[in-house]
Image (tube, helix red, strand yellow):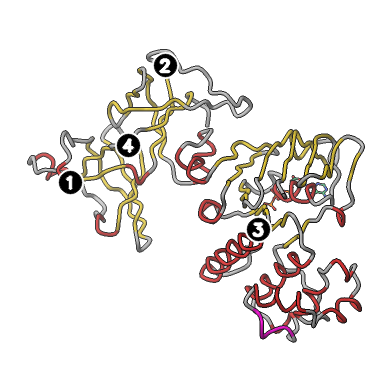
Amino acid sequence: MSRLEVRDLVVGYDATDVLRSVSLEVPDGSLLAIVGPSGCGKTTLLRTIAGLVRARAGEIRIGHRMATTHGIHLAPEKRRIGWVPQDAALFPHLTVAENIAFGLPTARGSARSARRAANRDDVRRLLDLVGLGSLGDRLPTQLSGGQAQRVALARALASGPDVVLLDEPFGALDPILRAELRRSVRELLREEGVTGILVTHDQAEALSIADLVGVMRGGELLQLDTPEQVYRRPATPWVAGFVGDAVFLPGTWHGDEVACALGRLPADWVSDDAATASPLEAPVDGASVDVLVRPEELLLRPLEAVLEGAPAAGGAAGWAGLAATVTAVSYTGHDAMLSLVLDDETRIDARVTAAGLLPVGTRVAVSTTSRVLAYAAGGR
Ligand SMILES: Nc1ncnc2c1ncn2[C@@H]1O[C@H](COP(=O)(O)OP(=O)(O)OP(=O)(O)O)[C@@H](O)[C@H]1O
């Protein structure tokens, strides 16, 4: 049982608090990805969980053990935590197998013990586990970046940790290797049943491999949810923009609908008060709101076809839309982002498949069939 629980954690280095009352729970065997802008406190959170930084207040419970609470600070080596840093940080004078053996509890941080343990079955198992079975005798300088990260992971797993903390472990790798390694790391953690926290700068990475995503800003955890909920129902407009492309339109609230530049759309009200777990009361009729639409939820048709009354793709009834002009195209291969200006001067982006690409200057009708989200106006 290695559930991780953090309650009301406050951490600071000097006069200012870097983490402000952070609470989170990672269920046994789950992977939580933490994202947030540079300096928001992600590494500090990991370091505090690992016991490398002392908390000013709050609790950290790892499995059944209380690691941090008022007056208690369990030493890092007693927390049963494995650490995978961004740069692998392997010992250059030890072989791959010796580096992994260094993580064994019996090595107790001694290179001599690590050398003696390098041929043990558990080291071989870890080498195989991370797909480096034949490279045990190599030195770190003879490894690629991805291989070095695999060794760092094996070394972190060698101690039989309850929780593995991964601080930007794929940051220095090229995109293809990065995608490959993150998939195998995810599988490995699952196979080993280890609970993990991964810090990453890559929102897409967080959404694609984690069971839970935590979004931090300025020392606070704004949302902790499944990847789908974080993307589909962001707690605040800022979270919406941080985890993906977002189109915000000014609008007014009318019961469970909003009126905005795209017309009258079915809408859900979302509290923008990160401090309260329960949603704020829905606004009064006619109140100003910010309307969130994801660019892929916008539907475009050449305006000409709409004016001529041609049926929409899929035969959708009542598909009319607002007139707009394509002002720029950002092509990414599988899809493209089109910048549009509506006739009322509102600027929005729409994501289309490569097949739906329209050149700059095309007049289009824009609409959406999605339910949109409404936030208190001015909360961005
Ligand atoms: N040892 C330290 N002493 C003083 N201030 C520190 C120390 N370490 C970090 N900080 C400050 O604490 C804040 C949070 O830093 P932290 O490294 O946790 O952020 P981060 O979200 O991991 O950033 P990045 O994504 O850039 O790695 C920053 O303002 C940073 O300058």
Mark 4 vs mark 2: give the one in front: 4
Q: Earlier in the sequence, mark 1 or mark 4?
A: 1
Residue linked to disc 3 = 193
Q: Secondary structure at mark 3?
A: loop
> Please, is residue 348 above or below residue 106 in the view?
above
State how far apart marks 3 and 4 are (Cα): 38 Å
Q: Secondary structure at mark 1?
A: helix
Q: Earlier in the sequence, mark 1 or mark 3?
A: 3
> Residue 314, labelled with which disc?
1
Residues marked 2 and 1 touching at CB (< 8 Å): no
State how far apart marks 1 and 3 are (Cα): 45 Å
Amino acid type for the residue under numbered disc 4:
Ser
Q: Main secondary structure of the magenta part?
A: loop
Amino acid type for the residue under numbered disc 1:
Gly
Residue linked to disc 2 = 287
Q: Earlier in the sequence, mark 4 or mark 2?
A: 2
Mark 3 vs mark 4: give the one in front: 3
Q: Nearer the viewer, residue 147 or 174?
A: 147
State how far apart marks 1 and 4 are (Cα): 15 Å
Q: Relative to residue 113, is residue 343 drawn left or right?
A: left
Residue linked to disc 4 = 370
Q: Residue at x 52, y 51 (%)?
A: 207
> Please, is residue 67 above or below residue 77 in the view?
above
Decide: few, some or many residues near mark 3? Use Cα within 10 Å; few <14, some 14-19, many ≥20. some
Amino acid type for the residue under numbered disc 3:
Gly
